[in-house]
Amino acid sequence: MRLSVLVLSGLLALLMRPSAAEISVVLASQEDFKPYEWREGDQIKGFDVDIVQEMARRLDWKVEIKLYPWKRVLHEIAAGSVDGGFSAFRTREREEYAIFLDPPIHLSTYCVFVNPERPIVFYSLEDLDGKVLGKNLGFSINSEFDHAQKRGRFEVIEKSMSHNLRLLAAQRIDAVIGNALEVDYMARELGLEEKIEGLPTKVASDTPAHLIISRKSPLAKDPELLKLMEETLRHMLEDGTYAALLKKYQ
């Protein structure tokens, strides 16, 4: 009798699990973060967007992507207003309200960018003392940089990357701290390649940026669905899909 109950319970669980075509996921991400994600007319574009949409296509899931300022993205995920988001650095605080999936969506390389007409030297954070820097609003570089910023060792102007690069080109700030792919892409788009130069020493080691799932989402309560998402991302990385999609933005 007990075996029959267990078998019946298992069958009911299978019947109650939604089919792939019935699964709809709402994800949030940073607005105006070229080339990773941005809105163009009624379309949402970008490398990270391509990765997420390809994952959903392979799973036969429906995915809706919403773009907000980054602080709101994290708030929506923590509140469970969306199923998850991308692309987030792993921190203890974020792990309290979100599950981080592997492999990451991309690796972020943060560098110092200067105007070659007024260059500075950078080998360590001490070289930035007293400087005026630009970086993306709401973005964390790493704990060492964030701590130095809080101590006031340098002034940081937190605006959009396009705004910061224009300030640098006009020599109104000393440097921009930014994601290398983002800065290179934006400098080309703004026609500022001759005014923007990356320094060889990285501000931080390459940092993984992940697809994360809100712990308040139904997805978080289904380990099999989370495993499917991770396996699909892993296959995309191994079969060259990541690299092929990235070429569009380099």
Image (cartoon, grey):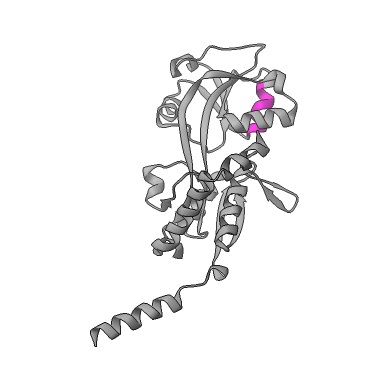
For residue 21, which quarter of the picture?
bottom right
Q: Give percent across and percent down for residue 139.
A: 52, 37
Image height of 111 relative to 39, above or below: above
Looking at this view, name the residue that lies furthest to the left: 2
Q: Is residue 226 left or right of residue 26?
A: left
Magenta region's main secondary structure?
helix
Image height of 70 relative to 132, above or below: below
Q: Is residue 186 left or right of residue 89?
A: right
Q: Is residue 236 left or right of residue 45?
A: left
Residue visible at 56% across and 71% down?
22
Quick one: quadrant of the C terminus?
top right
State the residue in front, 182 or 9.
9
For residue 146, which quarter of the picture?
top left
Q: Give percent across and percent down for residue 66.
A: 61, 54
Q: Give percent across and percent down for residue 213.
A: 46, 55
Residue visible at 45% across and 79% down?
15
Image height of 164 relative to 67, above or below: above
Looking at this view, name the residue that lies furthest to the bottom: 1
Q: Give percent across and percent down for residue 112.
A: 55, 22
Range of residues picked out in magenta: 161-168
Q: Is residue 133 magenta?
A: no
Q: Can residue 231 be seen here?
A: yes
Q: Can residue 217 be seen here?
A: no
Residue visible at 42% across and 52% down?
98
Residue visible at 39% across and 80% down?
11
